[in-house]
Amino acid sequence: RWPRKEIGEICEIRLGKMLSPVSKQGVRPIPYLRNANVQWNRFDLSNVAEMDFDERQEAVLMLRPGDLLVCEGGEPGRAAVWNGEIKRCCYQKALHRLRSIGDAVDSRFLMYRLWFGGTQNEFTGSNAKTTIAHLPAIRLAKLPIALPPIAEQQKIVTRLESELAAARALVETLETRLAEIELLPAVLLCTAFRGGDGLVPV
């Protein structure tokens, strides 16, 4: 029921800067994101590297809140929306940066669409039409998606985020219960041998 658009029709797609020994001389170091920093729907910023970006490169490759970063390799298609977690940050060539052309697409909606594609092996294996785990810009640009109006996209995102938050809370509760269950043998043994209704004196 929604029109289908190729991602290249609705987003500007740009790869980051190639890493090289020359780019790490400490002349103009700026934090940059690598493939490993981008996880599904989040960023792992525990280890952020730096390399040199000149003023022109910084102007072109500086991240803005709302940018969608997509992994080219590793786990192709893995994506997260940048929210300005680091004030001044760029990205390397292993990542695609997607920016909506006008108000064509909500970056969070597109991220969830790519996440769905990842669960369906859309970017790897037989569905990817290649034996190499790789998502080049030309193939990403040609990826068709069903595109509802922007207001509908935002409603879908709001509902998804609410349900995902509830799922995370449930997982946390289950993990707590499992941890308690794993401790149960030790508790029972302690009760048996050390007091309370202990069955055997130690």
Image: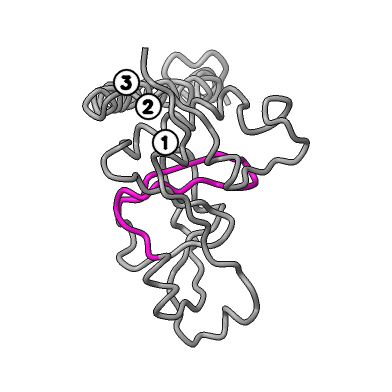
Magenta-drawn segment: 62-83
Residue 84 lies, with reference to residue 130, above or below; the image says: below
Which corner quadrant holds the C terminus? top right
Q: Magenta stretch: residue 88 in it?
A: no
Residue 16 against residue 128 in the figure, above or below: below
N-term-proximal mark, 1 vs 3 = 1
Q: Which mark is residue 111?
A: 1
Q: Residues within 10 Å of mark 2 (few under 14, many from 20)?
A: few
Q: Which residue is mark 2?
A: 168
Whether residue 68 is in magenta: the answer is yes
Residue at x 50%, y 45% (from the top left corner): 70
Place of residue 184 in the rendered image (x, y in percent of width and height, measured from the top left): 50, 20
Which amino acid is tagged 3?
Glu
Q: Amino acid at mark 1?
A: Met
Q: Residue at x 55, y 39 (%)?
A: 77
Left or right? Give the position of 75 relative to 176. Answer: right
State whether residue 76 is above or below residue 160: below
In this rendered view, identify the residue nearer to me: 153 or 199. 153
Q: How is the image coloured?
A: one colour
Identity of the residue drawn at 48% across and 31% down: 115
Q: Nearer the viewer, residue 168 or 78?
A: 78
Q: Which mark is residue 163?
A: 3
Question: Which residue is the extreme one toward the right?
Answer: 131
Q: Tell me how far mark 1 sits from mark 2, CA to CA.
A: 18 Å
User: Rounded to the nearest whole Å, what is the CA distance between mark 3 and mark 2?
Assistant: 9 Å
Element at label 1: helix
Magenta stretch prevailing secondary structure: loop
Q: Residue furthest left?
A: 151
1 or 2: tag closer to the N-terminus: 1
